Amino acid sequence: MSRKPHIVILATGGTIAGAAAAETGGAYTSGQIGVEDLLSVIPEIRNLAEVSGEEIASIGSQDMDESNWLPMARRCNELLARDDVDGLVITHGTDTMEETAYFLNLTIRSSKPVVVTGAMRPANAHSADGPMNLFEAVATAVCPDSCGRGVMVVTNDTVFGARDVTKSCTTAIHTFQAPNFGPLGHVHAQNVEFQRKPQRIHTTDSEFNVDNVKELPKVGIVYAHAGGDSAIAVEAFAANGYDGIIHAGFGNGNFNQTVGDALAKAARSGITVIRASRALSGAVTEAGEVDDARYGFIAAGLLNPQKARILLQLALTVTQDRDRIREFFKTY
Ligand code: GLU
């Protein structure tokens, strides 16, 4: 390429654009600082790429939902289809970054790099992590080796796959981890080195298309704890017309029997029930303590509950067939 790569930065808000009352951090408001202001503190980015910015939202990512995701996926696809755009960087709050990254991983139809980044410290805190994270996100987006690896999350010198990554700590800058497989690679200043590629279906091979989807099917998450009270939450989702329920179960997707009975009743009524786990790592397997065939449940495999929710929402846009949805959980 004779010209510099052109990277579009899509800003959504979050702490990377947050302003603190005191420079030490503490109480702050997400999404106060625009893309140009973020770029102005790291002019070196323009040595790596031509960058242009769009603000598509200005929110703390705790407020991120499908009303943002659907237009965001469409905008990403429009931009990535252009010959003059070589990759995207999306700035985002860290709270739901893994969910947005996984949603885009399944709905973007391009092998060009898409990198989601954010920060744990507000832009005007001491040792703010946002500028370096943004620089390294752009470095990853311009790296030819980044193509075809699905949507990535870059923070703290580390490149994660959207499917694997999760926020593991409330406050630390090394909050993002991929508990089962570790990162895809690392970034040191502008040098990006990959160790592996995601094996599950993503981006160009994904069959999910949200171009004409106005709203996603309703899927709720029920969290397991000692005792059977969560059955009340299962019944509330069922009574409110939910299409699916993710059970964030114990260990290998286990449940208290009262909750299991409520889930089985929901499954018999046509609601898709996925067994995920509240444990940080490991797969929920079909051949564990629960007989999924008997209950009509589907095992989430390695997806955590919040990502199992996204896959089920997208799966339900194309089918209600349980065998096909079970296959999605084995391949996506
Ligand atoms: N609640 C904020 C958000 O997710 C804080 C987390 C962050 O950006 O670090 O947008």
Image: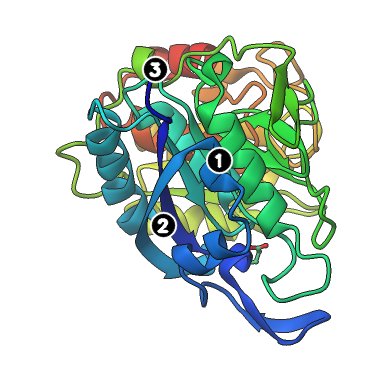
Checking the image for residue 1, the label placed there is 3
Mark linked to residue 166: none
Q: Nearer the viewer, residue 30 or 305?
A: 30
> Which residue: 40% across, 21% down?
203
> Disc 1 versus disc 2: distance between alpha carbons?
34 Å
Q: Residue at x 40, y 12 (%)?
A: 323
In the rendered structure, the answer to whether residue 45 lies left or right of residue 169 reads left
Q: Are marks 1 and 3 in contact (CB under 8 Å)?
A: no
N-terminal label among 3 and 2: 3
Query: Few, some or many C-alpha atoms within 10 Å of disc 3 (few <14, some 14-19, many ≥20)?
Result: few
Q: Is mark 3 within 8 Å of ligand 1?
A: no
Amino acid type, callout 3: Met
Q: Which residue is mark 1?
A: 47
Based on the displayed image, in which of its 4 quarters is residue 68 positioned?
Answer: bottom left
What residue is pinned by disc 2?
65
Q: Residue at x 26, y 44 (%)?
A: 75
Tell me which numbered mark, 1 or 3, is placed earlier along the sequence.
3
Distance of mark 1 from mark 3, alpha carbons? 15 Å
Which quarter holds ligand 1? Answer: bottom right
